[in-house]
Amino acid sequence: MIRDIARALRIFASERYPTVVALPVALCACLGPYAVAGGGWSVLVRVVVTTFLVLFALRIVDDIVSVEEDEKTNPSRALPSGRVDIQMLARGAVALTGAALVCGFGWLSLGLAVLGLYYVGFFLCIRHVSVILKPWFVNIVFFAIPIQLSWIQGRHAGLFLCTFGVFFWLTAVGHDFAHSVHAPGESHGDTPSASEILGPRRAALVGLACYVGAFAAGATLAYGLPGYRPIPILFSLGLALMFVRVCVLLIELIAHPCVERARRLYVGGFAFLLVPSFLLWIDRVLGV
């Protein structure tokens, strides 16, 4: 059975969660909060590993829940095509969650357990959750990523880490709305999308509003929180440049909504979160 679970995880990961991408993503997401929260290298390793494992498990669960839709829209994927056994993959998600709890022993395990219970409830009720509300709820994990630094050190989350959580969360929500945009004539499966319910331009505008909110949270991190000086130059510059880039892409998407333009935000829209987080760590290393 262990071999079957490992095989299912390997095939799924190669297609939907490649380690060469997912691990650097987890690292960059954690470096910024770690740079301010502090702690030894063991703290960073634990928080990166738990982030990687939790996001992997959530990716699996989300695909299992939407497998019927994928059978119609993405039948060649490993899960809907039957190349991956769904029961073995589900057991793999449980194993990944267990590994995250073990890695995060102490207060971090308790925080992860609460997060896990939240997602159990969410996925049990997902069929009753509006497509418009889903991005706001499913992306709560991104708010939790910076908070892990508090859990792992057994103390309450500070204002800085909570603001970092808002920055991450709004970026992820905006990314979901922007990436869902498609023109009225473009196929998007049987399930109504946010683009169909709100209209493609309004969906893109919601995405833009989320990125504006995320930028405001990021600017607050750089300039608005007392006790964090000097101002992080590289973080501020990276945040500004990424914001300009995302705004340009979103304005183009609003003007001419289509799948092709929405896909341009798939990487760039998420890099808006990762690049400033990484640069904040560089700021702290260089002391600038």
Image (cartoon, rainbow, N blue to C red):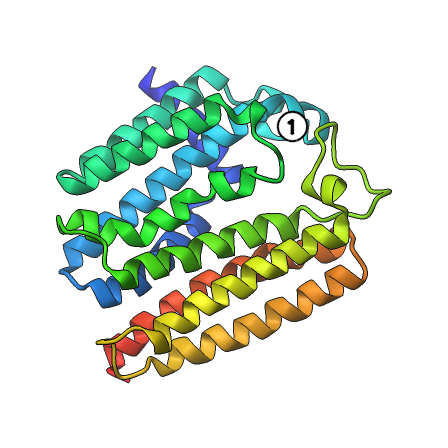
The residue beneath circle 1 is 70
Which amino acid is tagged 1? Asp
Q: Quadrant of residue 207?
A: bottom right
Q: Nearer the viewer, residue 124 or 13?
A: 124
Q: Position of residue 205 (x, y in %)?
A: 68, 58
Question: Would you say 287 lies left or right of 58 here?
Answer: left
The extreme right residue here reads 185
In the shown orientation, is residue 259 left or right of residue 155?
right
The answer to whether residue 11 of the structure is visible from this angle is no
- How crowded is the residue under tag 1: few (<14 C-alpha within 10 Å), some, or many (20+)? some
Is residue 164 or residue 100 the one in the foreground?
164
- Residue 7 place in picture, x, y as percent: 42, 26
59 versus 284 height, above or below: above
State the residue at coordinates (81%, 60%): 256
Image quadrant holding the N terminus, namely: top left
Q: Name the residue rendered at 70%, 29% in the picture.
A: 191
Left or right, 194 with respect to 1, comes to right
Q: How many marks?
A: 1
Residue 11 place in picture, x, y as percent: 48, 31
Q: Position of residue 80 (x, y in %)?
A: 61, 23
Image quarter of residue 190:
top right
The residue depicted at 53 percent of the width and 26 percent of the height is 126
Residue 48 at least partly seen: yes
Quarter occupied by the C terminus: bottom left
Is residue 7 positioned above or below 205 on the image?
A: above
Q: Secondary structure at mark 1?
A: helix
x 29%, y 59%: residue: 161
